[in-house]
Image: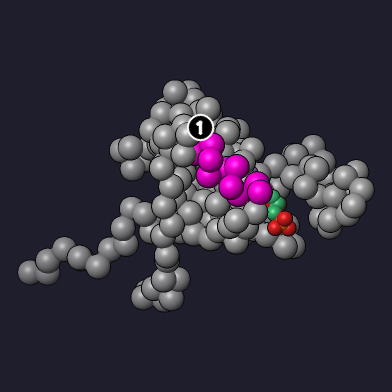
Amino acid sequence: MAGERTDVISWDEFFMRIAIAASLRSKDPNTQVGACIADTNHRILSVGYNGTPSALADADFPWGTSNDPLHDKHSYVIHAEANAILNYRGSLKDMAHATVYVTLFPCHECAKTLVQVGIGEVVYLDDKYEGTEDNLISKHVLDECGVTYRPIGIDLSAASRR
Ligand SMILES: O=c1[nH]c(=O)n([C@H]2C[C@H](O)[C@@H](COP(=O)(O)O)O2)cc1CO
Ligand SMILES: [Zn+2]
């Protein structure tokens, strides 16, 4: 009689893979970000990726950057973490002590929002803006507010196991 499979992926890997899948929906040509929020019972609460406000026509959106904020994507895009929170249809009380899995370390605006909604932990894949002013502020906010954060690595080649 066959025993149960033991080489299953961990919860961390499962939720991060969901975040990675969400990032694949992003139309940002430079940085695609995905976020997956899981509660303390390992239930997925919500998922999001960086994208345009839904009423803006994708085709008219300035996906480039510019010295003129009017023509810079950063002025308009909704971040993955914010979209994950905004996409949730339940009570925000459910987010208390939840973990957010993000493919990129949250910016300081997202860090504040995650704190305010009660997120307890940030798990991230990449921290490509490490050391920038925004990144340092973000970590300061998380540190001061008692939100822990840790990186994880994912062996994406494991996807070819089946
Ligand atoms: O926390 C974040 N969440 C998030 O969704 N983003 C998005 C906003 C932009 O669409 C993109 C960053 O673009 P860029 O790397 O070209 O500056 O990533 C960026 C951050 C942090 O930098
Ligand atoms: Zn952000």
Residue at x-position 20% and y-position 65%: 6
Is residue 10 shown left or right of residue 119? Answer: left
Q: 95 or 120: nearer the eye?
A: 120
Task: Give percent across and percent down for residue 115.
Answer: 51, 32
Query: Which amino acid does the dot numbered 1 rest on?
Result: Val
**Residue span colored magenta:** 133-142
Magenta-colored stretch includes residue 125: no
The image quadrant that residue 7 belongs to is bottom left
In this picture, is 68 found above or below 9? above
Task: Give percent across and percent down for residue 57.
Answer: 84, 45
| Type of secondary structure dominating the magenta stretch | helix
Residue lying at the far left of the rendered structure: 1
> Looking at the image, can residue 20 be seen?
no
Name the quarter where the N terminus is drawn.
bottom left
Is residue 43 shown left or right of residue 58? Answer: left
Name the residue that disc number 1 marks: 115
**Which class describes the residues within 10 Å of circle 1: few (<14), some (14-19), or many (20+)?**
some
Residue at x-position 60% and y-position 61%: 128
In this picture, is 31 found above or below 88? below
Name the quarter where the C terminus is drawn.
bottom left
